[in-house]
Image (cartoon, rainbow, N blue to C red):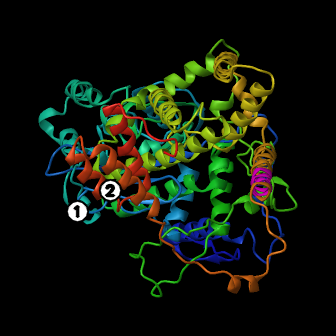
């Protein structure tokens, strides 16, 4: 039996030869996209340009948290889905033993795993914009689609469903994970249940499915998910991409599915952190290829963390769009030759990440790279804009934004406090305390000088303590400055001068200003006026900062001029005059003191010899002391002193 080789000539390769030839064509074909023998623009690039170049009013795709779960068993127990790696931008692996996470590092992929992933996308089920409200419903939808398309035998439906609905154990539960080398040595108890003739009846299988598998599934997040501190590293609008790979002994061909939900849905304990799931990639295959399944799972997870493929995954219309995204990723991949580097070495993330704007602009039709303009997630509101995030969207309801903020804050309200009960938080607490105290002392003293001590250090301390406690209880924004600042100091000084010039009571006037400010803030919150912040740019902030800087510079020069008025400079001073002056200490003339003592002894000596002795001793002392005793004695004995005293 003959086939044709790459050049179209017949060759006697047989069945095995045809398989290798088709595999070669399938693998090598994407590499000719930018070949010197073809046109400058490949079909994949044209498709990506069309996908990314579409103008739509929808907000930018949210950030993805990708989690890799593998079907593993521990100590001969039933198989469970166990988390082995996670991605935000870089990869983090569960270290051997399953007790801690590795440091984030650049994911190094094998070229073969990327080609295998491309094959999976070509042959597997691609389900885009589907609707599901729970994990069992989603799994049933995927399995039914596989049966309808002829990719799965109907009699294997219960076994695949049972496997996909097994319990998910995450790193937060401190379970022991075995190494990949031991995966093929243990036979899963779930597979033994299906192959054991003692319980081979369909009724027994269905009963075990409903009692053992579905009981492990919960639609609500677990406590470990809500307490996970890793959630603080994700933005509020983040979504999840779950990758499930594993090997089973009841499949002859791989079970592959890529699903994108119409709306992100919270699928219970499927994800380590309580974020809704948007993407789901499933790969179940025959035994003996656990290493390959693991690498394919890492490949799709790494692609989902790539910014360009991330946007393509959200905007793809069919299977060919996703394959074009993989081809674009392959075009940008740099291959390291084997033997010249150690794959076990983890590459640290770079300090400054290269921007992906150049790649996106190349496909979206942009001619020039943006140097000082919007990033793709800025929403096009000018450099440094705030973007179209959920917090800045107008709800149109009374206090709608406030209610949404409370709902977002409620799950983390308690953890914000008990997470601080840690020795590692002590240094941060002390630093914030000292920074707040020193700021209150500094600006409190300046406020005292500016307001004639109507607001001083003590008032600044009290205001900082009360407002800081209330703010932290209800807002929880630790980076906000709670005490007085430069703009407040300028405002208080101007207000005090205005009150003084117009004969107003400064403190009463200040109280009414605070009440009106609070009332206006409540109106702005109730009407969702905070959405206007998205139109503010750095020009507003920098203009206000420049005004404050000029005011402080003006005050500095003003004080210097006043010091020159109070202490004028002697312009006629000459350095040579210093030698014409001398400094000498001259003792006072004791004559007057002795005269007073003689008079005192003469007047009072006859009446009290003790007083005479005291005055005699005081003759060697200061004249003021002698006069003091003399006047008191004259008052006591009713003696009139001469006018000379």
Q: Residues within 10 Å of mark 2 (few under 14, many from 20)?
A: some
The residue closer to the viewer here, 224 or 425, is 425
- Residue at (42, 46) in percent of width and height: 433
Q: Is residue 560 magenta?
A: yes
Q: What is the number of the mark on residue 411?
A: none
Left or right of 213 in this view: 435: right
Taking the image as drawn, is residue 401 in sight? Answer: yes
- Dominant secondary-structure state across the stretch colored magenta: helix
Report which residue position mark 1 lands on. 182
> In x, y percent, where is residue 107?
48, 65
The residue closer to the viewer here, 321 or 455, is 455
Q: Tag 1 or tag 2, which sits nearer the N-term? A: 1
- Residue at (75, 25) in percent of width and height: 499
Magenta highlight range = 553-563
The N terminus lies in which quarter of the figure? Answer: bottom right
- Residue at (35, 31) in percent of width and height: 638
The residue closer to the viewer here, 604 or 260, is 604
Taking the image as drawn, is residue 70 in sight? Answer: no
Q: What is the number of the mark on residue 618?
A: 2
Left or right of 319 in this view: 197: left
Toward the top, the furthest residue is 398
The residue closer to the viewer here, 558 or 214, is 558
Residues at marks 2 and 1, CA–CA distance in whole angstroms: 105 Å
> In x, y percent, where is residue 477?
52, 37
Q: Residues within 10 Å of mark 1 (few under 14, many from 20)?
A: few
Marks 2 and 1 in Cβ contact (< 8 Å): no
Which image quadrant is residue 473 in? Answer: top left
Where disc 2 sits, the SS reads helix
- Foreground: disc 2 or disc 1: 2
- Residue at (22, 49) in percent of width and height: 175
Q: Is residue 622 magenta?
A: no
């Amino acid at each position: 039996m003959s086939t044709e080789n790459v050049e179209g000539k017949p060759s006697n390769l047989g069945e095995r030869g045809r398989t290798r030839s088709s595999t070669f064509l399938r693998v090598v074909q994407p590499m000719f996209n930018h070949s010197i023998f073809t046109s400058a623009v490949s079909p994949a690039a044209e498709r990506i340009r069309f996908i990314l170049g579409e103008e739509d009013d929808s907000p930018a795709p949210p950030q993805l948290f990708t989690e890799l779960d593998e079907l593993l068993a521990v100590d001969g127990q039933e198989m469970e889905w166990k988390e082995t790696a996670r991605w935000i931008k870089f990869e983090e692996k569960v270290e051997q033993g399953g007790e801690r996470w590795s440091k984030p590092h650049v994911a190094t992929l094998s070229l073969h795993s990327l080609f295998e992933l491309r094959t999976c996308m070509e042959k597997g089920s691609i389900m885009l914009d589907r609707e599901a409200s729970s994990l069992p419903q989603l799994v049933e939808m995927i399995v039914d689609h596989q049966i309808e398309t002829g990719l799965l035998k109907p009699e294997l439906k219960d076994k695949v469903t049972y496997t996909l609905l097994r319990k998910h154990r995450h790193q937060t539960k401190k379970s022991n994970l075995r190494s990949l080398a031991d995966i093929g040595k243990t036979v899963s108890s779930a597979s033994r249940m299906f192959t054991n003739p003692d319980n081979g009846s369909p009724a027994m299988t269905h009963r075990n499915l409903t009692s053992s598998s579905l009981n492990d599934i919960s639609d609500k997040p677990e406590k470990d998910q809500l307490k996970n501190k890793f959630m603080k590293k994700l933005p509020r609008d983040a979504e999840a991409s779950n990758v499930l790979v594993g090997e089973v002994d009841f499949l002859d061909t791989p079970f592959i599915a890529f699903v994108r939900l119409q709306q992100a849905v919270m699928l219970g304990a499927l994800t380590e952190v309580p974020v809704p799931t948007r993407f789901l990639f499933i790969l179940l295959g025959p035994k003996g290829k656990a290493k390959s399944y693991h690498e394919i799972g890492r490949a799709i997870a790494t692609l989902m963390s790539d910014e360009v493929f991330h946007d393509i995954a959200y905007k793809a219309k069919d299977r060919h769009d996703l394959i074009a995204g993989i081809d674009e990723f392959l075009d940008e991949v740099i291959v390291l030759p084997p033997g010249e580097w150690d794959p076990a070495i983890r590459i640290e993330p770079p300090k400054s990440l290269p921007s992906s704007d150049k790649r996106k602009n190349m496909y979206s039709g942009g001619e020039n790279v943006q140097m000082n303009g919007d990033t793709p997630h800025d929403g096009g509101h000018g450099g440094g804009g705030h973007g179209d995030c959920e917090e800045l969207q107008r709800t149109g309801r009374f206090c709608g934004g406030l209610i949404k903020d409370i709902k977002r804050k409620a799950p983390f309200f308690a953890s914000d406090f008990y997470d601080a009960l840690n020795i590692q938080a002590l240094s941060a607490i002390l630093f914030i305390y000292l920074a707040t105290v020193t700021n209150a002392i500094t600006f409190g003293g300046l406020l005292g000088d500016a307001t004639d001590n109507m607001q001083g250090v003590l008032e600044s301390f009290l205001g900082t303590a009360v407002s800081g406690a209330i703010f932290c209880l209800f807002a929880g924004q630790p980076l906000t400055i709670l005490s007085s600042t430069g703009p407040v100091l300028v405002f208080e000084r101007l207000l005090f001068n205005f009150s003084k010039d117009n004969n107003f009571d400064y403190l009463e006037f200040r109280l009414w200003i605070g009440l009106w400010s609070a009332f206006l803030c409540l109106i702005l919150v109730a009407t969702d006026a905070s959405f206007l912040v998205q139109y503010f740019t750095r020009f507003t902030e920098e203009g206000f900062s420049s005004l404050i800087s000029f005011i402080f510079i003006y005050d500095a020069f003003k004080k210097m001029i006043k010091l020159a008025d109070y202490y004028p400079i002697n312009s006629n001073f000459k350095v040579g005059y210093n030698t014409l002056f001398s400094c000498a200490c001259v003792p006072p003339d004791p004559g007057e003191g002795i005269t007073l003592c003689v008079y005192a002894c003469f007047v009072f000596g006859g009446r009290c010899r003790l007083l005479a002795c005291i005055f005699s001793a005081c003759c060697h002392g200061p004249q003021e002391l002698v006069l003091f005793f003399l006047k008191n004695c004259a008052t006591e004995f009713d003696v009139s002193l001469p006018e000379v005293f």
